[in-house]
Amino acid sequence: MRVQYFHVSLTQCDYQNVSPMGMVRLIASQKVFFFNQGDFSNSEIFLERLQQGDTLVICAEEMNDGSYWAEWVYHEKHGRLEPDRTISFNRSLGKQYLISLALMALIPAVYYCFINADDSFLMIILVSLLGCAAFGGIVLFALALAETKHILSPKRKSILKALDLVIDGQYQKSEQEQQIEILGIKSLKNKANKLRKSADNYRDKASLLVTRGKVNITSTLSLTVATGDAEQKLNHVGLQINKSHMDVLISANEPLFNNHNLFIAQGDELEVFHKNIQAHSKEQVIFGIYNHQDGLAYSLIGKGAPQERGFYFGLWGGICLLLMFFVFMAGGLSISETLEKGGYWDYWDWVNIVDTGVLFISFAVTILFGISFLIALCVAIYFKLSQRGNGYYQAQYILKHLRRKNGQTDYVTEVRSWTHFWVNVFSFWLWCLY
């Protein structure tokens, strides 16, 4: 995400009676900014002081739908919201590195047992336990590296330096643009988005019902549902629009791929697209929500079914991980074979490694892409023929045209629901590895 700095006038601040709880929306100078209250200390005191028309300087990163995620917010009189400056290396991080390295030291033992040990039941159990411990060490090491990267991040240091310069007044405002120039800080300009023209009859062929009006949030609940051995955190939101009651059940996990959660504030004007897909049920399945207050669009599908974009991210991401695993496995087997012959490397050893590795990887790629193509084809047929999939397509089409009509890009945020499907996909990839 690209860091940008704005000088804006506050139009609306929403942090009470919102969903999800703890998330804040600032609408300022026709831009939409989000952040979590928990990311900043004393955020509630700062928000209580804000009034319509206040001038704010905001550091933010643009998200896929054109809204922004705030890194810090500054007001000349009311103070500021800033990231934690005390983050540094500590004993906890050091212990995490030591534990992860100790567990990763089991990798050679796992490899040796896998190649040379007898195929007894106890040995299989031992290798499985050692493998799980080694994998846990890899995960811990990756998390420790991520924390270290955050501590040493040049971007984080630049963001804090920019805040200090803004506090000292060392920035220049532009009369035509909302972005500011800060002395010594590289400023990235907004790229012009390619906008498409909206069709006049984009609603004609849709079979979805539409409910539009001011929303009353009747309930916001945080739920924990057991899905097998794992627990899934969900947010349940009760909505009332024009005396119609609707329920939205979505995942409480943080969104991926530069997106944000579904945000609704009390009094927002919503346009909800829904449909009854069961013959003997009055339940209305919500497929799309367009928020006229901030111009953001969300697609939903429910029941743990995948949405199209998220499904393909998961599918092709899983393929890449499996291919990496097969590459390492092919390389390890080829090197092991050479070492068993005496460990003397010559031209023919390298030719054998390349020849065997390329053959093995080509075979694995062919099988993986074949299976993945069949999975993608089945999902495409599901979206085309099923009522739930067809409703999703219709909602996506309408929401894109609504955004075009308001001079925005086509991007519609896919809201994640239950994760039953993704548990099954993960199980499938594990089965492939096995």
Image (spheres, helix red, strand yellow):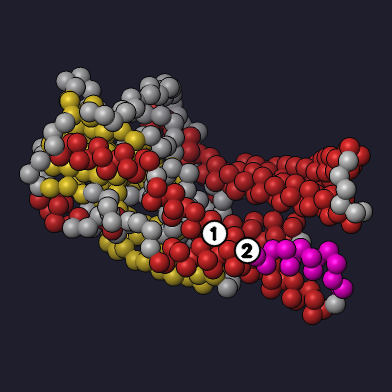
Furthest residue in direction bottom, as rendered: 122
Q: Is residue 78 magenta?
A: no
Name the spot of residue 278 as percent of width and height, x first.
54, 57
Name the spot of residue 358 as percent of width and height, x first.
83, 40
Marks 2 and 1: in contact by CB < 8 Å? yes
Name the spot of residue 396 as percent of width and height, x first.
48, 38
Within the image, what quadrant is residue 172 found in? Answer: top left
Q: Label 1 sits on what residue type?
A: Phe
Q: Which residue is mark 2?
A: 104
The foreground one among 85 and 424 is: 85
Name the spot of residue 199 as percent of width and height, x first.
43, 23
The N terminus is located in which quarter? top left
The C terminus is located in which quarter? bottom right
Q: Which residue is mark 1?
A: 141
Q: In terms of secondary structure, where does tag 2 sit?
A: helix
Within the image, what quadrant is residue 284 found in? Answer: bottom left
Asked if 246 appears above or below 398 in the picture, the reply is below
**Which residues, given as a range, are shown in magenta?**
105-119
